Image (spheres, helix red, strand yellow):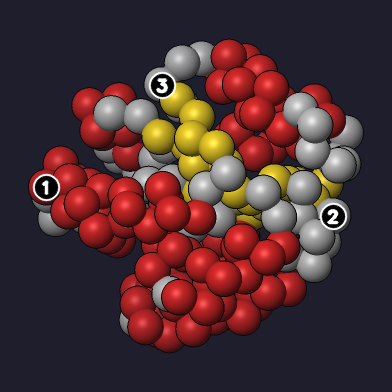
Amino acid sequence: MAHAILVGLPGVGKSTVGHALASVLNLTFLDLDVVIAQQAGEETAASVIEVRGLEAFRDLEARCLLDVLTESAIVATGGGVVERVDNQQALRQHGKVLWLDCADDIIIPRVTGSHRPLLASDPRASLAMLRHSREVLYKEISTARLDAAGNLADVVDSAVAAMSGWSL
């Protein structure tokens, strides 16, 4: 069972916070996008989407999610993992879900210059559309919602506080 599963929009800091949180708690860190890329034999999750298409990526994501959730780890997911009902059920059953969130105006500079196929054409409009479609899903499955706008140390401290009382 995962100790904590991080969800949120692209660029909110799931991988960065997850890695730092795992380090502070002396736990294993798993990045679902990295696992997907490795399983697909690609360098990045973005290249999996470009080569195989979004639907094939989502299929692979669902299979890899079940694998990583059996690990005792801090898990960073991709932003769209919540779009499938089976994934939502798996997230709820296999750990506590921390929803990292911050304003789009904070996310946009973070993703500018990065290779993110779902934000490629118009990052601001694409991000707003993703927020509109996913926000209710994040809210439904999350154990806690954390403000990811601050510096890394503050966000990690918030995550540790949210996890207090959880069995690690």
The answer for how far apart the CA atoms under marks 2 and 3 are is 27 Å
Q: Amino acid at mark 3?
A: Ala
Q: Residues within 10 Å of mark 1 (few under 14, many from 20)?
A: few
Q: How many marks?
A: 3
Secondary structure beneath dot 2 equals loop
Q: Nearer the viewer, residue 121 or 79?
A: 79
52 displayed left or right of 130: right
**59 with respect to 119 (left or right):** right
User: In the rendered image, which quarter is residue 69 located in?
Assistant: bottom right
Whether tag 2 and tag 3 are in contact, CB under 8 A, the answer is: no
Please, what is the three-letter code of the amino acid marked with disc 1? Ala
Please name the residue that numbered disc 3 is placed on: 149
Q: Residue at x 86, y 42 (%)?
A: 167
Q: Residues within 10 Å of mark 2 (few under 14, many from 20)?
A: some
Q: Which kind of residue does numbered mark 2 sit on?
A: Ser
Circle nearer the viewer, 2 or 1? 2
Query: What separation in Å lies between label 2 and label 1 (alpha carbons)?
Result: 37 Å
**First-in-chain label (2 vs 3):** 2
Name the residue beneath numbered marker 1: 125
In the figure, 74 relative to 45: above or below?
A: above
Q: Could you tell me if the residues under marks 2 and 1 are in contact, i.e. CB atoms within 8 Å?
A: no
> Crowdedness of circle 3 by 10 Å Cα count: few (<14), some, many (20+)?
some
Give the image location of residue 29, x and y in percent: 75, 47
In the image, is residue 88 above or below residue 124? Answer: below
**Quadrant of residue 57 in the image?**
bottom left
Q: Residue at x 43, y 85 (%)?
A: 56
